[in-house]
Amino acid sequence: MKVEEAFEIVEAAYTSKRMPHAYLVVGSPRGEGLDLAEKTAALLLCEAADVKHPCLRCDDCLNVQEHKHSDTFWLEPESKSRVITMEDVRETLLPWAAKSSYAGGWKIGIMLFADRLNDNSGNAFLKMLEEPPEETLFLLVTSSPDSLLPTVISRCQRLDLNVGRTPPAEPWRSEVGKIMADHSNTSALRVMSTSGRMVSLFDDIKKESEKSAKERLKQILEMDMEVDDDTYNAWISAGAKEIRAAVFESIRDWYRDVMVLSSTGGETDGIPLFFPEYKDATTAAAERTNPQRAVQNITFVDNMERQVEVRNMREDLVFPYWFTWLR
Ligand SMILES: [Zn+2]
């Protein structure tokens, strides 16, 4: 849904005094997700009394937009580690949550790139959310909600801003199509082949990300500015992570096709396929499975992504395991 539509939901909750303790905002933490977070914080903090809409002109509204309102708390991973650590949560967020607000009203904790919570920091946050402080709203903004702990997700009301998903960047998507078309879990050799090709695809993603970081660095140096190693490395890993997210989404899309074909007995009933060019391969995969089992494939891809992105497990160990199950 659009930001405006999501905001209407928030406004309705607010005016009817049914605010949840936390929203999971699925959208870019630098784009529409951030936009919704700022609007929501302004709504709760705007000093113009009895408003349904924040005025966006008063000191409170302006301070919210500049991320310096005393009743807001902004947390995002440091560029160095790209992780929201246990320390971040325990030593900054939790003490803030325990204090009462300055103005005597709401306070809002905003976590950008919430998918960068690891198991420890995620659990510490969760524990607090189980006994949430009064008049405190948390906004978890992320474009990769699948990397979050399911227990955290279940505690949040979800606002999905991904208006009609944009297809993942080429050429990665086509590569995924080619690999998946040859995949079959009926022999160990095939599984090894699929995994090996995926691992080398991930190596290519890293190289591609290094290439674009190098270009970005060149531009910055030309402007007589400097970039430290940590920032440079953060660019590479963030760039690679973004492409990998698109690759995992493509694998899920593949299995969404299998799911549709499996539940309709090979007919799509007008439902558009993500990989129409590989309909023969997805139909064959659908024939080897059943609708229930087809749904599981998607969960398996989620697990695979979590192991790689959150647990930082090696791809050459993760892929062979899950591709044995993916059919
Ligand atoms: Zn205002």
Image (cartoon, rainbow, N blue to C red):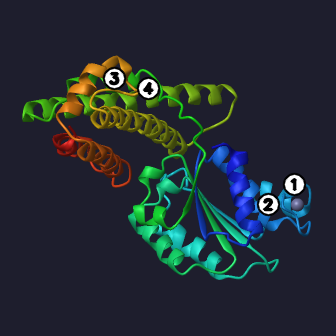
- Compared with residue 174, is residue 37 higher up or lower down, i.e. above or below? below
Q: Is residue 100 left or right of residue 139?
A: right
Q: Secondary structure at mark 4?
A: loop
Question: How far across and down, in percent of the image, does residue 92 sit?
Answer: 59, 72
Evaluate if marks 3 and 2 touch, with contact meaning CB atoms under 8 Å apart: no
Give how far apart the Cα atoms at labels 1 and 4 are.
45 Å
Circle 4 Cα neighbour tier, 10 Å, few/some/many (<14 / 14–19 / ≥20): few
Evaluate if marks 1 and 3 touch, with contact meaning CB atoms under 8 Å apart: no
Residue occupying the point 66% across, 81% down: 134
Residue occupying the point 64% across, 48% down: 33
Question: How far across and down, in percent of the image, does residue 198 sit?
Answer: 27, 32
Residue for badge 1: 56
Q: Along the polypeptide, which appears first: circle 2 or circle 4?
A: 2
Residue for badge 2: 42
Residue for badge 3: 175
Residue occupying the point 28% across, 48% down: 296
Evaluate if marks 1 and 2 touch, with contact meaning CB atoms under 8 Å apart: yes
Residue for badge 4: 270
* Mark 3: amino acid: Glu
Circle 2 Cα neighbour tier, 10 Å, few/some/many (<14 / 14–19 / ≥20): many
